[in-house]
Amino acid sequence: MSLLSRVPPIGQERQREMLKSATTLSYLETPEGPLRAHFFVPSDFVPGERRAAVVFFHGGLWDTPMATQFVPQCLHFASRGAIAVAVETRVQSLHGAGPMEALEDVSKLFAWLAEHGENFGIDPGRFVVGGAAGGAFLALQQVLPKPAKGEALPELTPRALILFSSLLDTSVASIAKRFPDARSARLHSPLRQVRRGLPPMILFHGKRDRVTPFDDARRFVRALKWRRNRVELVDFENADHSFFNFNLSELHYELTLKAADRFLVELGMLEADELAES
C-alpha cells in the first residue's frame, strides 16, 4: 500500500459539502468534462476591488482529483481578506494525463484569470501560488524556468509561493515515468532549475517524508539561498508526507497555516491579523 493511499478518502458527498461556500467556475473544457476553479471570496469583497489572491494546486502526484485538499486553507485566507482559489487540473485516473498536461492546464488557468482579473478582483502584485507535492511542482514551474531573452512575462506571475511536501526531483525513476521521457523529467526537475531572482518561498516539509524526501528540500533551499533568493524551510520532526492536511493533524495544519499567514504579512500581501496578535 502506498503512503498516499493511507490518506482517509474524501467521498463525493463530503466534497460537495466542503465546496458549498465556493463559487465554482469552469476554466477549461476537456473531453472528460470541465476543469474547475473554486473561488472563496471575502465576505466584505466589493466588485471592482483588487485583493491579494492565493491559488492552490492539490497533491496526489497527478493521479487522482483532490479538489478539496486546500479548502480549509482557502477558507482561512478568504477570512483574511484574500481571494482564495482551489484548482482542478487533469489527472491520470480521469483524463489519462500526467504532469505535462497539468502544466498546460495551469497556463490556461493563468491566462483565464488574467483575462477576467478585474471581475475576479485579483491584484497582480499580490498573486500567491501554492501547492502540495505534484501541486507544489506545478507552482514552482511557473517561476523556475528562465524566460527567453525578449520574452514578455505573463500578466499574472506568482509573487510568492507556499509549498507543502514539495516534489523537487522529478528525475527519479518512480516520478520520471510519468513524464513523456527521461529527458523531459530531468529538464523539469526543480533541483536543476534553481536560479537568481525568484520570488520569496516558504516550504513546509516532514523529515520522515518517503514520497518527496526531506533531503531534497534541504538541498533545494540551500541552492536558493546560495543564489540570494528569499526562502524559508519549516521542517517537522516525525512527520510524513501528508502531515499538514487538516483531516490528518489539526496541530500541523494550524502550525503551517499560521506560518504561511505570517509569511504573507511580512511580504505585505496581507494585513496583520490584530486578533491573532492580541
Image (cartoon, rainbow, N blue to C red):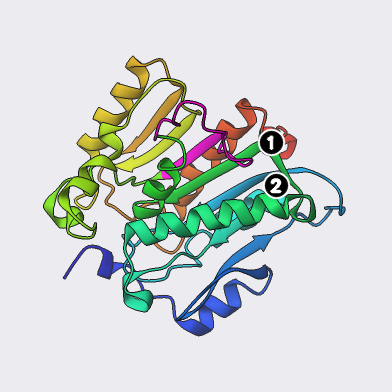
User: Can you identify the residue that label 1 sits on?
Assistant: 270
Q: Residue at x 46, y 80 (%)?
A: 31
Q: Which picture quadrant has residue 268?
A: top right
Amino acid type of the residue tagged 1 in the rendering: Leu
Tags 1 and 2 touching, CB below 8 Å: yes
* Bounds of the magenta segment: 145-163
The label number, if any, that marks residue 96 in the structure image: none
| C-alpha distance separating marks 1 and 2 | 8 Å
Quarter of the image that includes the C terminus: top right
Residue for point 23% across, 60% down: 178
Of the numbered discs 1 and 2, the one sitting upstream in the chain is 2
- Predominant SS of the magenta segment: loop
Q: For residue 276, which quarter of the picture?
A: top right
At which x and y percent is residue 223?
29, 23
Can you give x and y, in whole percent of width and height, for residue 207 in the image?
24, 41
Q: Is residue 275 above or below residue 4?
A: above
Which amino acid lies under the numbered mark 2 shown in the image of this protein? Ala
Magenta stretch: includes residue 276: no
Tell me the residue that label 2 is attached to.
Answer: 82
